[in-house]
Image (spheres, rainbow, N blue to C red):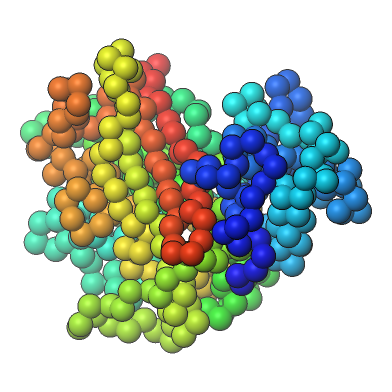
């Protein structure tokens, strides 16, 4: 999987791409964007710029006009050839002049969801999150007996997924405070974030035709950051017996660049072996190749910026950091499990991993965990405290892949600013 596109000596003629924290020429993510007041089109981020795929046709590197995101996601060979051609276009100075009309300053562009998301499913693969949150909801019984045997998930809502930067309107909903006799309806008082990865489905499967674990990686077209905004007060009241509903589906924010499996090839890890005494997954979830390289070496960061911090010109504050390797199930296991009953996944479906908390308290992927259910508010550099998110807070997720001998890549921001309830 490692080829010339990963060469750490490869540089681009695009200003500031070399050494860029997120988008050096070794990344080449896939996205959909609009230059100012123009129609959406597919492109790739490089440095602080975006190149339209159409530049490849102008440069004679591709013959097919109108290459679509759907085709690129669904066809690994097409995705790989696109990557090789973009790498050539953006590294060889002979293509600079012909590419200029197709190169846009990212700050002047609008980013869209990369594809229409047909279905969204959220899993619960972060075991440290599952245990900590389980303790808050069920002190005697934190981890339910199914957790280590079956990847837990639920069907989420695709219509309210938005790219980074879209405002997050504080939801209203029904709650019942622990000391109240009757429920009430109003703005959430316990609005939270969840640090997750999103998994983009490439090629789908036919209804009734499961995806064997050996083939699951072939169905993954890429990854993004995903913030599963959560109203904890609604959640506590509504979640039994059918699971999350309005506490979750008011909004989900993603980083809109699709970071491909090819870009992440240098950053694969063996799945951590399970602790002594944990069950081995059933055979349909067990793949030797998946266990050997199915985890990701990714650092995940959560930052907060309050209105007061902006007023004081303070930079965003690091709330916590975690690692993608803390997932109890691999991305391939989630895909295989989802399709194991014959459920058909489709190109552009999005799977959330679940909150990826680390084992340490400061590596938690939600405020529910960081503030111990709201009991221990976090103190910020502005001397404010937060048990949960307030109006005017911006929450930012970041991801960074690093490995010796390779250029580091990032995912781009996954950011949302909380606005008051209407
Ligand atoms: Ca979640």
Horizontal relation, residue 181 to residue 411: left or right: left
Q: Residue furthest top?
A: 311
* Residue at left offset 74%, top offset 67%: 77
At horizontal 54% and vertical 36% (from top left) the residue drawn is 163
- Residue in front for this viewpoint, 362 or 249: 362
Q: Is residue 3 above or below residue 82?
A: below
Q: Position of residue 355 (x, y in %)?
A: 34, 52
Q: Position of residue 7 (x, y in %)?
A: 61, 62
Across and down, in percent, residue 249 comes to 43, 40
Q: Quadrant of residue 39?
A: top right
Instruction: Tell me: 222 left or right of 64.
Output: left
Residue 158, located in which quarter of the rendered image? Answer: top right
Does 86 sit left or right of 193 as displayed? right
* Res 125 seen here: no
Q: Is residue 150 above or below residue 283?
A: above
Q: Nearer the viewer, residue 330 or 171?
A: 330
Left or right: 46 as drawn, with respect to 229:
right
- In this view of the protein, can residue 316 be seen by the observer? yes
Q: Residue at position x 16%, y 27% from top?
A: 385
Question: 335 above or below 224?
Answer: below
| In the foreground, 411 or 279 | 411
Give percent across and percent down for residue 342.
58, 72
- The N terminus, quarter of image: bottom right
Image quadrant containing the C terminus: top left
């Amino acid at each position: 999987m490692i080829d010339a596109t990963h060469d750490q000596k490869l540089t681009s003629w695009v200003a500031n791409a070399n050494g860029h924290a997120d988008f050096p020429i070794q990344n080449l993510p896939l996205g959909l964007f609009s230059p100012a007041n123009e129609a959406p089109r597919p492109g790739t981020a490089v440095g602080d710029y975006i190149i339209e795929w159409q530049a490849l046709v102008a440069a004679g590197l591709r013959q097919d006009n109108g290459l679509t995101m759907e085709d690129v996601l669904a066809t690994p060979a097409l995705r790989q050839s696109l990557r090789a051609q973009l790498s050539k276009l953006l590294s060889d100075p002979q293509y600079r002049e012909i590419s200029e009309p197709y190169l846009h300053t990212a700050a002047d562009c609008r980013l869209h969801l990369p594809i229409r998301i047909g279905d969204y499913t959220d899993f619960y693969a972060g075991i440290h999150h599952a245990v900590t949150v389980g303790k808050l909801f069920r002190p005697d019984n934190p981890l339910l007996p199914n957790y280590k045997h079956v990847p837990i998930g639920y069907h989420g809502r695709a219509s309210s997924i938005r790219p980074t930067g879209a405002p997050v309107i504080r939801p209203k909903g029904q709650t019942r405070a622990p000391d109240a006799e009757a429920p009430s309806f109003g703005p959430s008082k316990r609005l939270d974030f969840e640090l997750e990865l999103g998994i983009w489905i490439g090629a789908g499967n036919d209804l009734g035709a499961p995806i064997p674990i050996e083939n699951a990686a072939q169905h993954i077209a890429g990854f993004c950051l995903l913030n599963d905004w959560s109203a904890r007060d609604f959640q506590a009241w509504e979640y039994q017996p059918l699971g999350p509903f309005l506490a979750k589906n008011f909004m989900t924010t993603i980083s809109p660049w699709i970071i491909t499996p090819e870009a992440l090839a240098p950053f694969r890890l063996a799945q951590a072996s399970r602790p002594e005494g944990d069950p081995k997954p059933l055979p349909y979830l067990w793949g030797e190749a998946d266990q050997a390289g199915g985890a990701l070496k990714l650092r995940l960061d959560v930052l907060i910026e309050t209105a007061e911090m902006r007023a004081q010109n303070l930079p965003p504050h690091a709330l916590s950091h975690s690692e993608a390797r803390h997932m109890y199930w691999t991305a391939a296991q989630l895909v295989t499990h989802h399709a194991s009953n014959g459920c058909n996944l489709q190109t552009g479906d999005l799977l959330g991993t679940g909150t990826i908390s680390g084992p340490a308290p400061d590596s938690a992927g939600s405020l529910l965990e960081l503030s111990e259910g709201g009991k221990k508010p976090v103190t910020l550099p502005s001397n404010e405290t937060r048990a949960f998110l307030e109006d005017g807070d911006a929450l930012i997720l970041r991801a960074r892949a690093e490995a010796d001998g390779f250029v580091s890549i990032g995912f781009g921001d996954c950011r949302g600013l909380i606005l008051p309830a209407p």
